[in-house]
Image (cartoon, rainbow, N blue to C red):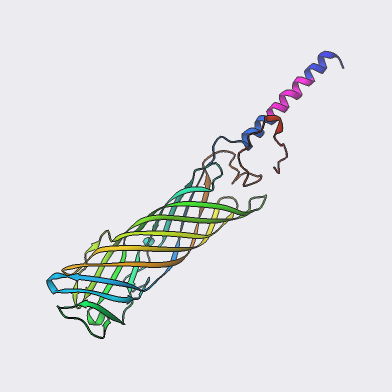
Amino acid sequence: MGSVSKICVALALGIFSVTITRAQIQNYDEPKRGSVYFSLGYDVQFFKASNITIKQESLNNSYTLQNVNATNTNSVSAFSPTSLNYKFGYYFNYNQDAGIELSYSPCQYFVTDGQKLTASGTIAGAKPTGTQLFSKTAGDYYYLYGGAGNIMINGSGRYGIYRKESYKFAVDFIAKAGVGALLPKVQNSLDGHTGNVGMELAGIDFGIETGLRWISHRFYTVELVYKYRYAFLSNIQVYEGWASQNIGSGALALNVGVLLPTTKHNPLFDLGYAHRKRINHERHMYLIDTKY
């Protein structure tokens, strides 16, 4: 082989090697990464016993119902699309383990019918004695449901527990925390005095959420999560007055959704090591192995 041929072969090999190196840099040292997710699901919610304070000046009522129990189901709450929770989130950092989320959850709080409650304070100007039956047949009910529900802004985090090389199966641990507003439909009756006012801003709540996310075929997700929320409610309209209370609640939720890339060569969706971090080595130090 002549010198000219050797030079041509060397140039061809050089160009080929630079092309491979550039492709490797594009795949493994992306300048930006990101992904978005959307899910919907159903919550099974349970409430801690709480106190409800009632103020009705025209009736000379100022009392607190102690240790009130409530459920998240009632005959007035028919199933509808607003009975589901909805989430839209964006992982914005390079390793896609931190993000922000906008979520909607239904507000479904119904004071349990037929329970006996103790009241402190004054009713009709006198101190109540003993217990009183809180029953719809006796003219008492208290519902917060429907309306615009609970809208929250959350900070979200993700940690990859396992990811199969083929990307047909993966498991992430997810955690979230945020603050939101409660805008339910208000319906109540106290001693036969009805105070239905429709939807109103009932208060704010804070919440945390943890759970597992299963990912199938790179894009499809199933989540099983536990939520805890604490709500501060005030100025809930009742007949000739208002009510206030603080509510602690827990919930189990099952959600289905999709996870999608917003950037090319995203390691959460392309073959390769799923949790690799940014590489700042010189070009000749990049690995060519597809299992990197």
Residue beneath the point at 29% across and 63% down: 233
Quarter of the image containing the N terminus? top right
Across the whole image, how many numbered discs are drawn on residues?
A: 0
- Give the camera-side residue of 13 and 157: 157
Q: Is residue 227 left or right of residue 138?
A: right
Residue at the right extreme, as displayed: 1
Residue 117 location in percent, x, y?
Answer: 29, 81
Dominant SS type (magenta): helix
In the displayed structure, 118 sits above or below 204; it is below
Q: Is residue 169 left or right of residue 148?
A: right
Residue 102 location in percent, x, y?
Answer: 41, 51
Quarter of the image containing the C terminus? top right
> For residue 194, which quarter of the picture?
bottom left
Q: Is residue 278 left or right of residue 177?
A: right
Residue beneath the point at 44% across and 66% down: 251
Whether residue 46 appears in magenta in the rendering, the answer is no
Residue at the left extreme, as displayed: 58
Residue 30 location in percent, x, y?
Answer: 58, 36
Whether residue 11 appears in magenta in the rendering, the answer is yes
The residues colored magenta run 9-19
